[in-house]
Image (tube, coloured by chain):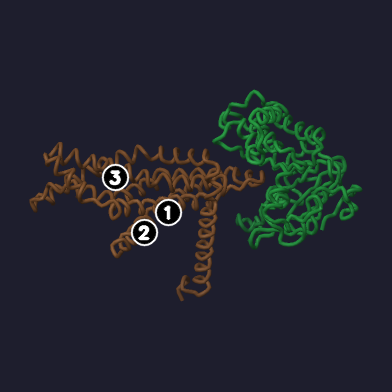
Amino acid sequence: MSTPLTPTPAAESAAAVPDALVELRGVTCGYGERIILEDIDLVVPRGKLVALMGTSGGGKTTVLRLIGRQIGAMRGQVLVNGQDVATLDAAGLMAARRRMGMLFQFGALFTDLSVFENVAFPLREHTRLPESILRDLVLMKLNAVGLRGARDLMPSEISGGMARRVALARAMALDPELMLYDEPFAGLDPISMGVAARLIRELNDTMGLTSILVSHDVEETFLIADHVVLLANGRIVAQGTPAEMRASEDPLVKQFVHAAADGPVRFHYPAQDAGHDFGVRG
Amino acid sequence: MIRWLRPSVVGQAVRLKVTDIGYATRLFLKLLGTLPATFRRPRLLSEQIFFLGNYSLAIILVSGLFVGFVLGLQGYYILQRYGSSEALGLMVALSLARELGPVVAALLFAGRAGTALTAGIGLMKAGEQLAAMEMMAVDPIQRVLAPRFWGGVIAMPLLAAVFSAVGILGGWLVGVVMIGVDPGAFWSQMQSGVDVFQDVGNGLIKSVVFGFTVTFVALLQGYGCKPTAEGVSLATTRTVVMASLAVLGLDFVLTAMMFSI
């Protein structure tokens, strides 16, 4: 079960919040026999930036996949805009996904298309805009991420940070109401990381988005998130504002926030007694 | 008891195989269903026909020429024993149109274009490009697989025809120019002996069937592969092995059927 440290008003009245864009109710999910998430309750209020944090393999990305119904839940409900995504038919799912933008871990740009065509892709697929309007729209999106000048480059010719920003422009091309970010800071240098973090926050506020950010980068995430949810072993172990998380006395939260090698998450993989293994004890 | 003989192990293996076959069948039917939508976007389709055809053209031309050379030499060796070396043109044309054109072109197509298809789609999967497309509410089967599928189905018979034509030229070069078979007999025997429906038609049917087979195997392997570097390389190998075996097996079945009609 989730144990909120100091629950925010939004988290307290989970089911009753009419302003929740995304809501997970008692969701259990896994692949085959392996359970990844167990009995998760999560509320993402409209207009907020909620960060999902936790150790690698803790099920953070699975939450994003559930929201876009790339995988289904074994038990429980995933509500987007009050609608259970499991009940959507093919057309309904497509319509729901058109209102979501997702930024994948390494951008997932189409390698055979230029930067411009990557951003134009969703517009070409879903609209019949005249070429001149399409061009202006794409350049506006690219301008928002500072890459208007890189329009003619191929994905192989730009850096990892730039690829992430192009992917961000592409994810926003259809003006979504919900943005999902899967590890947007992974593998970026400090400058690119700062740029990406600022962009995510600014876009959320200026375009009236709701964002869910999966990350394990404590500093950058605490700087921009409204609400932080800490996942471990498939459960929500703590949540609160970044300030509350920093002040927390919970040993697991402390270990995570201060990046300690040993704590509730063990440094050593379970093994038999060291003395026995090295033969120093009879 | 031997481990693999245990009913549970055998049952599990059979179940997995049946699941695979079901998955492949569903994908094949889905791809067949994409026909109208694919032809509504002719630019994507023509891009793939160009890409796949162009990719394999050089290897098809060179191989066709050499197969023709060899046919000219071997054919002459056999036919002159019976004093009928004028029939060389007919023999070369029949072997190519009925058999070698479609089969060898399909094997080369699997090695050149098939692997490129598998690797391309496997890499798109490994780089989460297909997942990104799904999240943009675009169906990867319709947008990525379908144009490649129909492109391959159209490109394959064209390549087989090019292979046969170049092979006949090769046979002519060796038989007429090098050995000195009478050119009039070479061409006129071919003209009177090759039937458009019986010989060229049967070859065409074969090449279309092989086009479906090779392209589908390549797409199935690419789309179903594990999204890792290792998975992509395994899938590429499997494409060549499975497509080649399928082509040779189907060739026998088709030939047997065509003889019985």
Q: Give above or below for B201 relative to A242.
A: below
Q: Are marks 3 and 1 in contact (CB under 8 Å)?
A: no
Q: Residue furthest bottom?
A: B1
Residue B79 in percent (x, y) is at 12, 51
Same chain, labels 3 and 2? yes
Rendering coords of residue B198 (x, y %) = 28, 55
Instruction: Check disc 2 and report its element: helix, strand or loop.
Output: helix
Q: Are marks 1 and 2 in contact (CB under 8 Å)?
A: yes
Q: Quadrant of the C terminus of chain A?
A: bottom right
Q: Residues within 10 Å of mark 2 (few under 14, many from 20)?
A: some
- CA distance for labels 3 and 2: 19 Å
Residue type pointed to by label 2: Leu
Position of B74 relative to B28 (above/below): above
Instruction: Return the residue at label 1.
Output: B213
Callout in the foreground (3, 2): 3
Which percent across, then down, holds residue A276? 63, 58
Of B63 and A191, the residue lying toward us: B63
User: Mark 2 highlights which residue?
Assistant: B250
- The answer to which image quadrant residue A88 occupies is bottom right
| Mark before the other along the chain sequence, 3 or 2 | 3
Q: Amino acid at mark 1?
A: Thr
Label 1 in the same subunit as label 2: yes
- Residue B164 has which mark? 3
Disc 3 packing (10 Å; few <14; some 14–19; many ≥20): many
Residue at 31% x, 43% y is B163
Residue type at mark 3: give it.
Ser
